[in-house]
Image: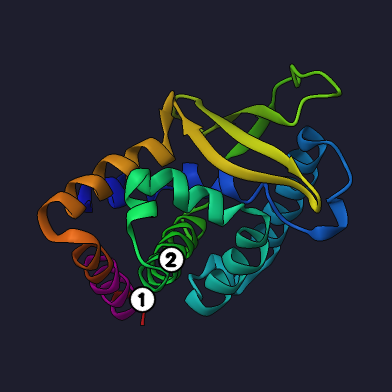
């Protein structure tokens, strides 16, 4: 789990997830939503000296406000846990969602603090008007580095488009976490996984204080 978390705690991932923010854009298409809100958040980061200086409180608040509301987190949790979701009690499901959500927020907040001068290139959306699930493809360009392909899987719901997976350089976030979590459940059970997430979140909070 440690290598997975460290791998996703990069500015690449943060630049991807900042694309999902703002209920004001709920009625627009998924590609417009990605582009408009991503540019808005990047502008905030560029102009906020506290965030640039690494103010963890503001970074955490930005990640929580701009990212989480636009997830179908129930769907993400079900996909990540697979058959283990149905085998968990309601209390375990709630505890897992709480800790997994905190893990993601802190991971992305850490990545946001590393943002420098990356830019995002948006690919044309290849979808039909009747599609209820689409993939929005983008490319993150880094000064002096190789471009990174980041694709977003979104589903159309009653309250707008919601993200349920992100694919970075062909690697699915959900698939990676699912493998890690399934291994932990096999070794320690559902309660063991939840406890591991609790410990990880406490460790992250302590290191940022």
State the mark number for residue 208.
1
| Residue at the extreme left | 187
Asked if residue 172 is positioned above or below residue 195 in the image, the reply reads above
On the question of residue 181 being in view, the answer is yes
3D distance between C-alphas at marks 1 and 2: 9 Å
Q: Mark 1: which secondary structure?
A: helix
Q: In this orientation, which residue lies closer to the viewer: 28 or 122?
A: 28
Q: List x then y, in percent, for residue 105.
A: 48, 64
**Quarter of the image holding residue 41?**
bottom right
Q: What's the residue at 61%, 52% (across, down)?
A: 72
Q: Mark 2: which secondary structure?
A: helix
Q: What's the residue at 43%, 23% (across, down)?
A: 170
- Residue tagged 2: 106
Asked if residue 128 is positioned above or below residue 90 in the image, the reply reads above
1 and 2 marks in contact (CB < 8 Å): yes
Of badges 1 and 2, nearer the viewer stands: 2
On the question of residue 117 being in view, the answer is no
> Considering only order in the chain, which callout, 2 or 1, is on the residue closer to the N terminus?
2
Q: Which residues are magenta?
A: 196-206
Q: In the figure, is residue 202 to the left or right of 18?
A: left
Q: List x then y, in percent, for residue 12.
A: 48, 41
Give the prevailing secondary structure in the magenta stretch.
helix
Q: List x then y, in percent, for residue 37.
A: 76, 49
Q: What's the residue at 80%, 44% (across, down)?
A: 36
């Amino acid at each position: 789990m440690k290598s997975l978390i460290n791998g996703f705690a990069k500015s690449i991932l943060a630049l991807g997830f900042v694309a999902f923010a703002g209920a004001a854009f709920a009625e627009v298409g998924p590609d417009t939503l990605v582009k408009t809100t991503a540019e808005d958040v990047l502008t905030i980061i560029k102009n906020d000296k506290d965030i640039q200086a690494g103010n963890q409180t503001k970074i955490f608040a930005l990640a929580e406000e701009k990212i989480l509301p636009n997830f179908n987190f129930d769907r993400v949790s079900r996909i990540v846990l697979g058959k283990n979701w149905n085998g968990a009690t309601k209390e375990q499901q709630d505890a897992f969602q709480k800790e997994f959500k905190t893990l993601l927020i802190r991971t992305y907040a850490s990545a946001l603090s590393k943002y420098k001068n990356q830019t995002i290139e948006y690919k044309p959306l290849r979808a039909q008007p009747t599609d209820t699930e689409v993939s929005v493809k983008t490319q993150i360009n880094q000064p002096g580095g190789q471009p990174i392909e980041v694709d977003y899987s979104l589903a159309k719901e009653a309250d707008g488009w919601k993200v349920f997976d992100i694919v970075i350089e062909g690697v699915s976030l959900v698939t990676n976490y699912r493998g890690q979590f399934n291994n932990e459940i096999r070794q320690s059970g559902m309660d063991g996984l939840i406890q591991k997430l609790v410990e990880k979140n406490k460790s992250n909070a302590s290191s940022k204080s």
